[in-house]
Image (cartoon, grey):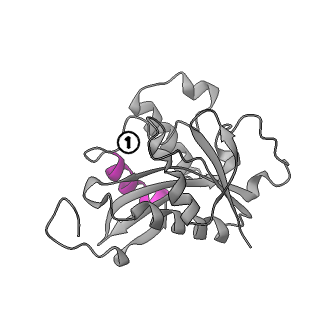
Amino acid sequence: MSPFSDTPINLDKLVFQEVAAGRWADFARLFESRGGPKACWCMVWRTTPAERKQTDGASKKAAMAARVAAGVPVGLLAYLDGEPVAWCSVAPRSTYRRLVKGMGTDPTTEDNIWSIACFFVVRRLRGQGMTRRLIQAAVAYAREQGATVVEAYPVDPDAPSYRFMGFVPTFEEAGFSEVGRAGYRRHVMQLKLD
């Protein structure tokens, strides 16, 4: 049951879909909803040097829209009863600017590493295990796209920042193992896929 409602919510009805041009309107509606990430449009880790100069929400929305229109993978939407209710940024690590400085990678396998970089869940569904479900869907999606490793950058539950990237215990429960650190707060965790 949701902590914000007396009506039980059946999360088994969740449907996960790739954000593609045909779902742009749903993506925009979720991001522009109350409490949505309309200021960043999940561009924090994606911006090019030229895009970094544009700091307003409209420019970030346009940059994300251009990626989606071009068919660049950006992530998944979760739907409940046909309504977009959550988001997980999952894409090839190469589509992000460097998430982790100093961790060398083999450029021939870079596209086989997919990164989970952030989450957004509508308020009424928070605290019900949505992040776990988003991680499961993201891993399945990355595997279908040919990923051999899924990487994430969560923080400790008491961290004062980067909380949108998820928490270490949730990723540990999903089978991820720590392989390094990114700065002071972010852990670098990986799940190797068969």
Name the residue: 40% across, 32% down: 57
Q: Position of residue 188 (x, y in %)?
A: 65, 47
Q: Is 125 above or below relative to 7?
A: above
| Residue under numbered circle 1 | 37
Towards the viewer: 117 or 26: 117
Whether residue 55 is visible to the viewer of this picture, yes or no, is: yes
Question: Overall secondary structure of the magenta stretch?
Answer: helix
Q: Is residue 187 above or below residue 25?
A: above
**Residue for point 52% across, 63% down:** 135
Q: Is residue 53 left or right of residue 78?
A: right
Residue closest to the far top: 53
Q: Is residue 115 magenta?
A: no
Q: How many marks?
A: 1
Q: Quadrant of residue 39?
A: top left
Task: Please state if 192 lies on the left or on the right of 84 as rendered.
Answer: right
User: Would residue 26 be counted in the magenta stretch?
Assistant: yes
- The part of the chain drawn in magenta is 19-31
Res 71 visible: no
Quarter holding residue 130: bottom left
Q: Position of residue 77 (x, y in %)?
A: 43, 61
Q: Residue at x 47, y 64 (%)?
A: 132
Determine the residue located farthest toward the left in the rendered image. Answer: 6
Q: Position of residue 55 (x, y in %)?
A: 46, 25
Relative to 39, residue 167 above or below = below
Residue 5's spot in the image, x, y percent? Answer: 16, 63
| Label 1: which secondary element | loop
**Residue type, mark 1 in image:** Pro
Front residue of 159 and 38 = 159
In the image, 149 versus 96, the foreground residue is 149
Q: Residues within 10 Å of mark 1 (few under 14, many from 20)?
A: some
Residue for point 49% across, 50% down: 166
**Viewport quadrant of the N terminus:** bottom left
